Image (cartoon, helix red, strand yellow):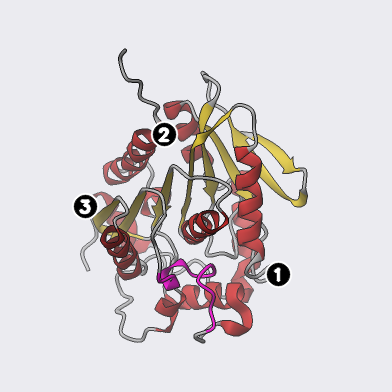
Amino acid sequence: MSFHPDLRTARFLPRSFLAGPRSLRLTRWMAAAAALRAGGEVIAIPDEPAVSVRVYRPQLVSAPAPALLWIHGGGLVTGNAGSDNDFCTEVSNELGAIVAAVEYRRAPEHPFPTPLDDCYSALRWLAEQSDVDRERIAIGGASGGGGLAAALGLLARDKGEIQLAFQLLVYPMLDDRTALRTDIDERRFRLWNQRSNRFGWQSYLGAVYGTDEVPMLAAAARCEDLSGLPPTWIGVGDHDLFLDENVDYAQRLQQTGIRCTLDVVPGAYHGFDVIAPKAPVSRSFIEAQINALRGALTRTTTPE
């Protein structure tokens, strides 16, 4: 039950910030208010008028530049493209990369496959930009966005149109079957528990929730064949509801021969780096993500 020493305020946090339909409007309003100060340039996707991206460009850039398509969290039902403004800005400036945060449509109004299709439209748009190096495109996301990023990796692999360089999965929401478990001790969880998880998956999956008919692109953990995916980084705290499914996914990637780094943070809860971004453990976690992206997206040259 002990939290990381840098996260002492965890005991004052709720176990869930989203309990169901009644709280959804409030959480969306709070996310929208927080994003009012977000930077970047909002660009509509020409072929998909319902989809836009918030584009962050580095202060110094050499074209063609590496790029990251970022998918915000929110349990598939809340959050927005400006939610991770600080992270997207830091990645862009640190790596000289173009970061596009996608404003995808959310459940329950827009269940699977609409959010995933929106993300793929944004990925295709990003790959077509003249200042983007098509060979150095990564995808990433946190929580529900991490789950969408994992599914997007599978979709991109199957379509074969865009060869991804990397995927960054931050405590990703990968497996709807976790919401059906009854053997989990929830006392150590903060901000996201089984009640939140059930609501998120029910909203996203609709009638197939709780059945064996859930498509693998709706919940990446259900995919039996993980071959052909790009190198991957997965990070999660050991006080996170998604710990087991994240560890399992990382191990399956490794067993398939995919290069995968798994970073498990002791005593860390879901979203700890967002709640306490200045805590040393959070900074280390964020820097690990940026370093993983740097290793994947930095072009190396061979001396002649």
Question: Disc 3 vs disc 1: Cβ atoms closer than 8 Å?
Answer: no
Amino acid, disc 1: Glu
Q: Helix, strand, or loop for circle 3? A: helix
Q: Mark 1 or mark 2, which has the lower sequence index? A: 1
Of residues 96 and 142, the one drawn nearer to the viewer in this rendering: 96
Mark toward the start of the polypeptide (2 vs 3): 3
Depth check, mark 3 against mark 1: the one in front is 1
Side of 192 relative to 115 (left or right): left
Q: Which residue is mark 1?
A: 109
In-image side of 68 versus 265 (left or right): right
- Vertical relation: 200 (above or below) 88: below
Q: Which mark is residue 297?
A: 2
Of residues 279 and 230, the one nearer the viewer is 230
For the N terminus, the image quarter is bottom left
Left or right of residue 82: residue 253: left
Local secondary structure at mark 2: helix
Residue toward you, 173 or 302: 302
Query: In front: mark 2 or mark 3?
Result: 2
Q: Residue at x 59, y 76 (%)?
A: 205
Q: Is residue 66 left or right of residue 130?
A: left
Q: Exactly how many numbered labels are in the figure?
A: 3
Q: Is residue 292 above or below residue 73?
A: above
- Dividing the picture into quadrants, the one containing residue 99 is top right
Q: Which residue is mark 3?
A: 5
Q: What are the residue bounds of the magenta stretch?
A: 213-224
Q: Residues within 10 Å of mark 1 (few under 14, many from 20)?
A: few
Q: Residue at x 52, y 27 (%)?
A: 65
> In which quadrant of the rendered image does the C terminus lie?
top left
Amino acid type, callout 2: Leu
